[in-house]
Image (cartoon, rainbow, N blue to C red):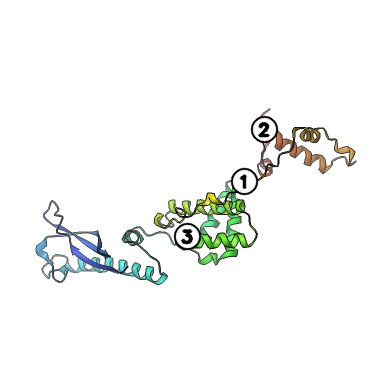
Amino acid sequence: MKVSVDVKLYTARTLSNGENPLVIRLTQNNKRKYIRIGISLNPIFWDKKKDKPKPNCENKELIENIITEKLAKYQKQILEFQSTGKIYSLNQLIDAVEKPVKNISVEEYLNSIINSLIKQDRVGNASHYQALFNSLHAFTKLSQLQFVDIDLPFLNKYEASLREKGNKGNTINIKMRTLKATYNKAIKDNIVNAEYYPFNDYNVSKLKEKTPKRAISKDDMLRVVDFDVKTITKRPHSLMQFSKDLFLFSYLGCGINMVDMAHLKKEDILT
């Protein structure tokens, strides 16, 4: 698991100007990766034994400073991985250094999604993310949660916690699908590297349960249509009549939900 980091003059490749590129060499379990640092030298100016520019090398101090800075970045990242006990590959180490992600917590990112959806009047969609936010907040210290912390053990514990609270499979499915969508958005926004994606090993679809059909019969529906609310209320502007009208509008509108109905404008309804 230990990774060694050093700098080498990569003599296996010679550039058109006769120079060789300087590279950071990473070694882990006999596997090696070479990362170019954007500098090349003529071999006569490189000390192979000390792995550093010779005293007569032009811009020697500048080159040494660049090497030192690059080595320090990799050593710092290795220490960060070790401090969290994270198992990592050479590719993950390289990505962490060469493609640094934005330091945004899950809490901050979820809030940004919710606010964006509300501004777009996508209130129904925003409610799913808000429900996920509230659920995660009750489960863990959300302000400290990073996307790299959401791994397979985390998902299994979160699912178990939801079940303990009485949530059914379909409810858990919605929360997990929303969390999965959040993670995918975070990858696209460079908040977390795709190599940490935990949903390749966690099957969200397993949570979905078949629900019994709850549709009423055609005859019952006709009874609702024909029902005169005046037989049970004498108020001139009855809320019961309004409720019946909304229900029928939703039914005749192919099941349009109440939130979408609330946002309808006159110009949205074709005559």
User: Circle 2 is placed at which residue position?
Assistant: 269
Instruction: Give me the residue at 31% from left, 61% from top.
Output: 90
Picture residue at 82% right of the left edge, 32% below the top: 226
The percent position of residue 151, horizontal first and vertical second, equals: 46, 60
- Going from N to C along the chain, the mark reached first, 2 or 3, is 3
Circle nearer the viewer, 2 or 3: 3
- Work out whether mark 3 precedes mark 1 in sequence or the reverse, and give the earlier one: 3
Q: Amino acid at mark 1?
A: Lys
Q: Is residue 49 rendered to the left or right of residue 219?
A: left
Q: Is residue 257 above or below residue 196?
A: above
Task: Estimate the spatial distance between the alpha carbons at disc 2 and disc 3, rounded to whole Å.
Answer: 47 Å
Q: Residues within 10 Å of mark 2 (few under 14, many from 20)?
A: few
Place of residue 186 in the rendered image (x, y in percent of width and height, measured from the top left): 46, 54
Q: Quadrant of residue 223?
A: top right
In the image, which is nearer the foreground, mark 2 or mark 1? 1
Q: Is residue 36 left or right of residue 193?
A: left
Q: Residue at x 44, y 55 (%)?
A: 197
Whether residue 150 appears in this view of the structure is no
Q: What quarter of the picture does the C terminus occupy?
A: top right
How many labels, in total? 3
Which residue is label 1 attached to? 210
Helix, strand or loop at disc 2? loop
Q: Is residue 157 above or below residue 270?
A: below
> Residue tagged by mark 3?
152
Spot occupied by residue 125 in the image (x, y as percentages of width and height): 59, 48
- Mark 3 crowdedness (10 Å alpha carbons): few <14, some 14-19, many ≥20: some
Q: Residue furthest left?
A: 44
Q: CA distance from mark 3 to mark 1?
A: 25 Å
